[in-house]
Image (cartoon, rainbow, N blue to C red):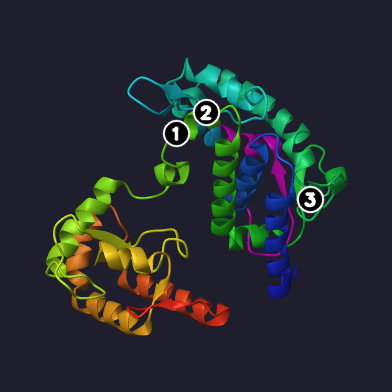
């Protein structure tokens, strides 16, 4: 089979985006289905451009793995706990089933070892997946937009169309990130969860961003590396009057690498905000990373961050090329 060309791959990604932006969602099942298909494409597919038949029980197993983590109570104060509602009305059926099983099985491994209960669960979840999200995932405004699979051919198995597996494998990280972000957004906007979650730091921060303690530890390292001077204006800083800044803004690349951190005084940090710094600072940042690479690797990696200088610089190359193409404004001290 022929591999999809660049235009076909781009269209596939746009179709995924269309489903997530324009599809209707009464539960989180569609997010779970897309993530499951992406992971199964990696586990069972090949980069051949061909189709792939998936057992519904295999998809069901991915659903159980995803929701097993989701039904852990979200702790919001010293006494309160909340199992996040995954449905617009009553709790989603699959989630309720897993909640019940969690009361008798302390781990997913123990549940799997009880083969009779495990197989019954997979069968029930598979039936729910087949009749709910599989049927509705590609439905946009009452019409089926069948670019992943044809429903009429998905009886005993879900048969992914030619070239779909290649694209799922190629863009698995993007698909995971898009689905996770929309999943979080759905959870936050769900009326059953809103009264509690609206009073808390955002879920994105809770689930994905480094903790304040981690950033404080990074600040302690950077204070020494920068002689307690602001990376941008080079003025001396008082303790407590500085902040860890993402040189490549978090809004552009929402993942942390150790070489991306710099320390800025509160004024510069506030003014730079989520802008890219000007070329003079890009050059300074490159030099800093080259000269202090071993120290950054040694002292920041132990805090749990990826410390790969080359990877950080490739991210910067991408960010500045994108800025040039899109005419982004670069921040400098005169702005």
Q: Position of residue 114 (x, y in %)?
A: 52, 20
Where residue 195 is drawn, which disc sits there?
A: 2
- Mark 1–mark 3 Cα distance, whole angstroms, equals 41 Å
First in sequence, mark 1 or 3: give its number: 3
Secondary element under disc 2, as helix, strand or loop, is helix
Is residue 63 on the magenta stretch? yes
Residue that mark 3 sits on: 149
**Residue 146, placed above or below residue 246:** above
Is residue 244 on the magenta stretch? no
Residue that mark 1 sits on: 199
Q: Are marks 2 and 3 in contact (CB under 8 Å)?
A: no
- The answer to whether any part of residue 261 appears in the image is no
Q: Quadrant of residue 63?
A: top right
**Residue 236, placed above or below residue 165:** below
First in sequence, mark 2 or 3: give its number: 3
Q: Position of residue 62 (x, y in %)?
A: 58, 38
- Mark 1–mark 2 Cα distance, whole angstroms, equals 7 Å
Say which residue appears at 47% left-offset and 15% top-offset. 104
Q: Which residues are magenta?
A: 44-64
Q: Which of the image's four quarters has the C terminus?
A: bottom left
Left or right: residue 153 versus residue 206 is: right
Q: Are marks 1 and 2 in contact (CB under 8 Å)?
A: yes
Q: Nearer the viewer, residue 128 or 328?
A: 328
Left or right: residue 57 versus residue 330 is: right
- Mark 2–mark 3 Cα distance, whole angstroms, equals 38 Å
Q: Nearer the viewer, mark 2 or mark 3?
A: 2
């Amino acid at each position: 089979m022929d591999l999809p060309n660049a235009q076909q791959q781009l269209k596939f990604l746009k179709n995924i985006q269309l489903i997530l932006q324009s599809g209707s969602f009464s539960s989180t099942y569609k997010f779970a289905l897309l993530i499951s298909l992406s992971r199964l494409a990696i586990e069972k597919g090949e980069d051949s451009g061909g189709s792939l038949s998936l057992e519904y029980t295999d998809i069901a197993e991915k659903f159980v793995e995803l929701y097993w983590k989701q039904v852990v109570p979200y702790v919001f104060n010293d006494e309160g706990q909340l199992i996040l509602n995954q449905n617009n009305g009553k709790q989603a059926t699959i989630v309720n089933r897993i909640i019940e099983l969690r009361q008798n099985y302390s781990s997913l491994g123990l549940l799997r070892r009880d083969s009779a209960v495990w197989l019954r669960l997979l069968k029930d979840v598979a039936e729910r997946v087949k009749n709910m999200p599989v049927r509705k995932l590609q439905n946009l405004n009452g019409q089926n937009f069948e670019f992943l699979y044809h429903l009429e051919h998905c009886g005993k198995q879900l048969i992914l169309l030619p070239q779909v597996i290649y694209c799922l494998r190629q863009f698995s990280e993007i698909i995971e990130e898009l689905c996770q972000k929309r999943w979080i957004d759905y959870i936050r906007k769900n009326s059953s969860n809103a009264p509690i979650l609206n009073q808390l730091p955002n879920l994105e921060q809770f689930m994905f961003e480094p903790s304040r303690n981690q950033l404080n530890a990074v600040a302690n390292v950077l204070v020494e590396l920068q002689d307690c001077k602001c990376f941008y204006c080079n003025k001396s800083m008082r303790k407590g009057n500085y902040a860890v800044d993402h040189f490549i803004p978090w809004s552009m690349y929402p993942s942390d690498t150790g070489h991306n951190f710099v320390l800025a005084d509160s004024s510069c940090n506030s003014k730079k905000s989520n802008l890219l710094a000007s070329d003079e600072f890009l050059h300074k940042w490159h030099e800093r990373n080259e000269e202090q690479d071993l120290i950054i690797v040694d002292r920041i990696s132990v805090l749990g961050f990826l410390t790969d200088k080359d990877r950080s610089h490739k991210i910067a190359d991408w960010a500045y090329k994108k800025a040039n193409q899109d005419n982004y404004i670069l921040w400098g001290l005169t702005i």
